[in-house]
Image: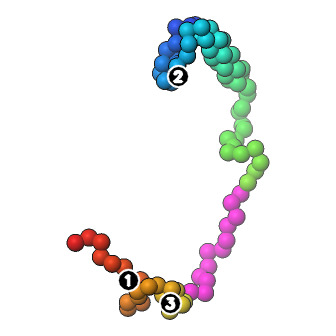
Amino acid sequence: MSIDIDTARRVAKLARIKVEEGDLPALAGELSNILTFMEQLNEVDVEGVEPMTSVTPQRLKRRADVVTDGGMQEKVLSNAPDAREGFFAVPKVVE
């Protein structure tokens, strides 16, 4: 696919990029090269290839979902500036 100068001008306007009139032929050529490469990519057979998010296979490390040593309410609340009835106390923000 070939991009003409008018299309390059319109693309620059839509992208809000100021392109001088003398630079439009070079921009049209670059956009044409990009579209030619995209057409080459469409010719590649990707049947049976799974989509990937990275070039290296990665799996997130997971931990076992087990109950840990909870029951440290007093220890946690000891850091609070104000604690009442086993909870953090905060000032009222809505009247």
Disc 1 target residue: 89
Q: In which quarter of the image is residue 54?
A: top right
The answer to whether residue 71 shows anywhere in this view is no
Name the N-terminal-most of marks 1 and 2: 2
Name the N-terminal-most of marks 3 and 2: 2
> Helix, strand or loop at disc 2?
loop
- The quadrant the N terminus occupies is top right
Residue depicted at 66% across the width and 74% down the height? 64
- Mark 1 is surrounded, within 10 Å at the Cα level, by few (under 14), some (14 to 19) or many (20 or more) other residues, namely few
Q: In this view, does 4 lie above or below 81?
A: above
Q: In this view, does 74 lie to the left or right of 39?
A: left
Task: Say whether residue 61 is magenta.
Answer: yes
Task: Say whether residue 55 is magenta.
Answer: no
> Helix, strand or loop at disc 1?
loop
Residue 81: x and y in percent read 44, 85
Which segment did they paint magenta? Answer: 59-71
| Front position in the image: 27 or 37 | 27
Residue 39: x and y in percent read 67, 19
| Front position in the image: 24 or 35 | 24
Disc 3 target residue: 78
What's the amino acid at mark 1?
A: Ala
What's the amino acid at mark 3?
A: Ser
